[in-house]
Amino acid sequence: MKGYGQYCPVAKGAEIFAERWTPLILRELLLGSTHFSDLHRGIPLISRSLLSRRLKQLEAIGVVERRQGRLGPEYHLTQAGREFGPIVRALGEWGQRWFRSRLGHTELDVNLLMWDMRRCINADALPSGRLSVQFDFTDLPASKRLWWLVSDGQDVDLCPTDPGFEVALYVATDLRTMGRVFMGDVSLKAAIGAGHIELDGPRDLCRQFERWLGLSSFAGIADARRGTGAARDRVRPPARSSAGTPV
């Protein structure tokens, strides 16, 4: 990585943190992803070869350590890496407050959205036993339209193909609406009331949907460029990921 040629600690820190893709890799590691495939799912636009190179660079400078796990190599943050946590959090808060995404088609990826939703689910609010929820993104092509979240009462899996379990709850929406709900631009109740999200299933499961569907931890941050009045619908307090780190 190319340096700034300065002894200033800001310059030295930026040589590591400001390298392209590095903040997102750190975000994924802070969220608890340890396997290469999971890291890549969280950053789908980075090539696998570049992700591998960045991980090796972070390992060489002592930010990441590579361990051999039960299912293969794992990547973990060192103490130096974990200290990036407040910086990543502050960057996300600034971005949500001052440079908030308008969720245009170039910024929306159903795979990434579902992956983020999966890890923000409030597992404690899920019913006991197996639960399969099918999401139907009506504005997407058939190959990307259907997704399943499957809970066994403890863990939640994301399935891009039919896992074969009986579906207990059907959710029909469009990608942008679901993204706006997840990021706190509109409440789930408002989206359902406007007919942009339709639920089909037992009444108790429909009522519980809002309780266990976690939002981004940045969802409660107001858009400073538009104010807090009529700029966006009221949202409930943000959920946290299973790793306890913001998404």
Image (cartoon, rainbow, N blue to C red):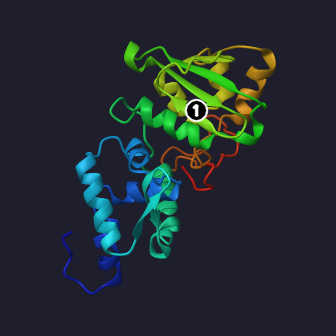
- Residue at image position (67%, 18%) is 169
Q: Is residue 198 above or below residue 113?
A: above
Q: Tell me if I can see residue 25 in this picture.
A: yes
- Residue 105 image offset from top left, x and y in percent: 36, 29
Query: In the picture, which quadrant includes the N terminus?
Result: bottom left
Q: Residue farthest to the right?
A: 204
Q: Count all numbered tags in the image, as a single digit.
A: 1
- Residue at image position (41%, 68%) is 65
Q: Taking 54 as reference, is 69 left or right?
A: right
- Residue 129 image offset from top left, x and y in percent: 76, 29
Q: Taking 12 as reference, is 175 left or right?
A: right
- Residue 26 image offset from top left, x and y in percent: 42, 60
Q: Nearer the viewer, residue 9 or 158?
A: 158
Q: Nearer the viewer, residue 232 or 149?
A: 149
Q: Is residue 36 above or below residue 129?
A: below
Q: Is residue 172 above or below residue 208?
A: above
Count residues near mark 1 (Cα–Cα under 10 Å), then give few for <14, some for 14-19, many for 20+.
many
Q: Tell me if I can see residue 230 in this picture.
A: no
- Residue 4 image offset from top left, x and y in percent: 21, 76
Tell me the amino acid under the disc marked 1. Answer: Val
- Residue at image position (60%, 54%) is 243
Q: Residue farthest to the bottom?
A: 7
Q: Nearer the viewer, residue 223 or 247?
A: 247
Tag 1, which secondary structure?
A: helix
Q: Taking 157 as reference, is 69 left or right?
A: left
Residue under label 1, please give it: 181
Q: Nearer the viewer, residue 82 or 190?
A: 82
Q: Where is residue 210, by image quadrant?
A: top right
- Residue at image position (52%, 60%) is 89
